[in-house]
Image: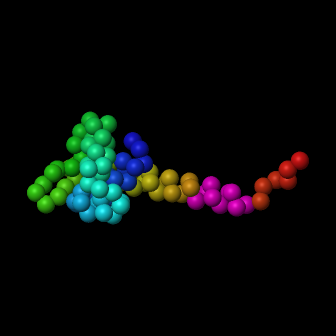
């Protein structure tokens, strides 16, 4: 699972619509749809029900959503930690 695929998944889950999620992510719909399809293919199961007015999470998608949010939160936390460490003075160099 790539971070991009998880970001795409969360956006579609929260927006309930590929077009709105694409605008939110500053993408067009085709690549966003490909991200979702690739994630579903990798996991071997559909995550969304395609409905006339958008997308609805299936139980499999609900199961992934909490994990995806936690994963992205950890990635953000790791980046903040590294940036903070880069600002701290290190040991004197010889």
Where residue 74 sits in the image (x, y, percent)?
Answer: 49, 53
The picture places residue 41, in percent across and down from the top left corner, at 27, 37
Where is residue 78 drawn, in percent x and y?
Answer: 56, 54
Count of picture labels = 0
Q: Residue furthest right?
A: 94
Look at the picture and state if 73 lies above or below 34: below
Magenta stretch: includes residue 19: no
Nearer to the camera, 60 or 39: 39
Residue found at x 34% / y 53%: 8
Query: Looking at the image, can residue 92 be seen?
Result: yes
Task: Name the magenta segment's main secondary structure.
Answer: helix
Figure quadrant of residue 51: bottom left
Residue found at x 89% / y 47%: 94
61 or 50, nearer to the observer: 50
* Residue 64 position within the rendered picture, expressed as x and y whole percent measured from the top left: 32, 48
Looking at the image, is 43 positioned above or below residue 7?
A: above
Any part of residue 13 in sight: no
Q: Quadrant of the N terminus?
A: top left
Q: Magenta stretch?
A: 80-88
Q: How is the image coloured?
A: rainbow
Q: In the visual, does 14 lie left or right of 1? A: left
Which residue appears at 32% of the width and 36% of the height? Answer: 42
For image coordinates 26% across by 54% down, the residue present is 29
Q: Let me know if residue 83 is in the magenta part.
A: yes
């Amino acid at each position: 699972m790539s971070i991009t695929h998880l970001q795409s998944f969360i956006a579609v889950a929260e927006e309930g619509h590929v077009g709105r999620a694409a605008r939110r992510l500053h993408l067009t719909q085709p690549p966003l749809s490909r991200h979702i399809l690739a994630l579903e293919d990798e996991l071997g199961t559909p995550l969304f029900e395609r409905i006339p007015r958008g997308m609805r999470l299936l139980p499999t998608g609900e199961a992934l959503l909490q994990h995806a949010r936690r994963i992205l939160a950890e990635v953000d936390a790791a980046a903040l930690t590294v940036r903070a460490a880069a600002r701290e003075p290190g040991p004197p160099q010889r």
